[in-house]
Image (cartoon, rainbow, N blue to C red):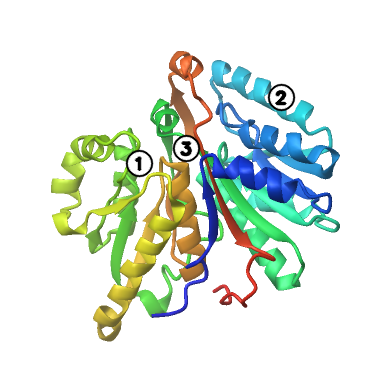
Amino acid sequence: MSVRRWERAIDHHGEEVPEFVRDYFGREDRSVLLVVGAGFDPRSTHVARLLAEVLGERLKALLIREERARPDPALLALGERNLSALQHLIPSHSMAQIEIFAPDDAMIGGREAVGALRTMPLDGRTDVVVDMSALSIGVSFPLVRALLERITSRHTAVNLHVIASANAEIDDLIIPSGSEAFDTVHGFRGRWKLHETHEAAKLWLPQLARGQGPTLQRIHDQIEPDETAPILPFPARRPRRGDDLLDEFSREVLLAWDVDPRNLVYADEDNPLDLYRTVLQIDDARQPVFREVGGSLLFLSPTGSKALGIGTMMAAIERDFPVAYVEASGYQVDVASLERLTEPEGTLVHVWLHGEAYAQVLPTLP
C-alpha cells in the first residue's frame, strides 16, 4: 500500500471553519486570493463574506461566471444578485466569464477556467482558497488541480485550501439537466484508453444524487464498467437520505447496473476525507487481485454533495483516476423553495490541501 498524500490532512467542519478563518486568516501576514463561483446558488457569497470580514483589503478574488446557452431568466437574476454582492464584498477582484460549451457542444469549461486562472499572479499571496460551493464539477476540479500543480512545481510558499458550503437540501432543489456531451473532466482522464489499461478490470463508483438517473446511465453506457459500486451518503443529516436514493435508483442498481449489494459504498455526507480514504482503500484492495490479469482501473462520477465532491477530487488527483462526467446544459431549480430556505448556507467544510501545515514532504503528484 502506497503512502497516502492526505491521510492526515487538516480539515474543519461546521463552526470549526469560522473559528479557523478568524485565527489563521486574521493574522496580519495573510494575503489571500479567493476563487469563487458567482452563480445563482445561494451559497455563492457565504465563504466570501466570512473571508472579507476577516481579511478586508488583504483579500483579492477571481469571480467565475459559468455561461450556458439559454439560461433561465429567474436563475440569471439570482446570479446577477450574487455577483453584485460579491463585487461589493471584495472590491479588489477580477471576473472571468467561462463558456461551458464550445459551438459544437464539446465541454470546454474546465480548460477555459484554467486559462483564466493563469492570468492571476500569485506573487505576494500567502494563500489561495477555492470555494467550490457554487462551481460545477467540470470547473472546480480543473481549477484545484491546476493550482496544486502550479504551486508544487514552482516550489512556492503558497498554501492551498478548498472550502464548500454543504447543504443536501439545496442540492435536492438544484437538479442539473444533463447535456449530450460526455467526457472526462478536464485534467482527469487518468489512464483511461491507454494501452496499459486496455485489459484492466473497470470499477465505476458513481455518487448517487436526486434526479441524476439518466445522466449516470449515460456515463455507465459510455465506460461499460465490469462492476459498479454506487456511493450513498451515510451518516447523513437526514437519516433516510441513502434509503431514498436507493429507492429512486432501484431500476439502475438492480437491473441496468447489476450491482452486488456488497458493493454499496457508504460515506459521511459532510466529511470529504471519509470518502477519500474509502476510495483509496478500495483501490488498494483491488490492485493485488487484478495485477496478473490486466490490472484494475477505477472511474469516479461525482454528483450532488459538495463535501463528497471534495473527497472524490482528492482521490482522483492522488491516484490519477478518470472522472467520467456529463456537463449540465442547464438546471431545474425550485426557485420559490430555494428562497424560502431558513438556512440556505449549509455546513462549511474546509480542507487544507497544501502548504506550511505539512512539515513532512508529501508524495509526488502523478
Instruction: Kindly state the secondary structure of the residue where label 2 is placed.
Output: helix
Towards the viewer: 334 or 90: 90
Q: Nearer the viewer, mark 1 or mark 2?
A: 2
What's the amino acid at mark 2? Ala
- Give residue 21's position: percent from left, percent from top: 67, 45
What's the amino acid at mark 1? Thr
Towards the viewer: 149 or 344: 344
| Marker disc for residue 328 | 3
| Marker disc for residue 215 | 1
Instruction: Kindly state the secondary structure of the residue where label 1 is placed.
Output: helix
Give the mark nearest the N terminus, 1 or 2. Answer: 2
**Placement of the C terminus among the 4 image quadrants:** bottom right
Instruction: Kindly state the secondary structure of the residue where label 3 is placed.
Output: strand
What's the amino acid at mark 3? Ala
Mark 2 near mark 3, Cβ–Cβ under 8 Å?
A: no
- Give residue 212's position: percent from left, percent from top: 34, 37
- Give residue 353's position: percent from left, percent from top: 59, 60
Instruction: Tell me which corner region of the image, top left, top right, bottom left or bottom right, holds residue 242.
Output: top left
Residue at figure coordinates x 35%, y 41% from the top left: 215
Examine the rendering and report whether any part of residue 260 can be seen: no
C-alpha span from label 3 to label 1: 9 Å
Instruction: Tell me which corner region of the image, top left, top right, bottom left or bottom right, holds residue 155.
Output: bottom right
- Give residue 133's position: percent from left, percent from top: 55, 39
Is residue 28 shown left or right of residue 127?
right
Give the mark nearest the N terminus, 3 or 1. Answer: 1
| Marker disc for residue 304 | none
Q: Which residue is mark 2?
A: 85
C-alpha span from label 2 to label 3: 25 Å
Residue at figure coordinates x 42%, y 67% from the top left: 192
C-alpha span from label 1 to label 2: 33 Å
Q: Nearer the viewer, mark 2 or mark 3?
A: 2
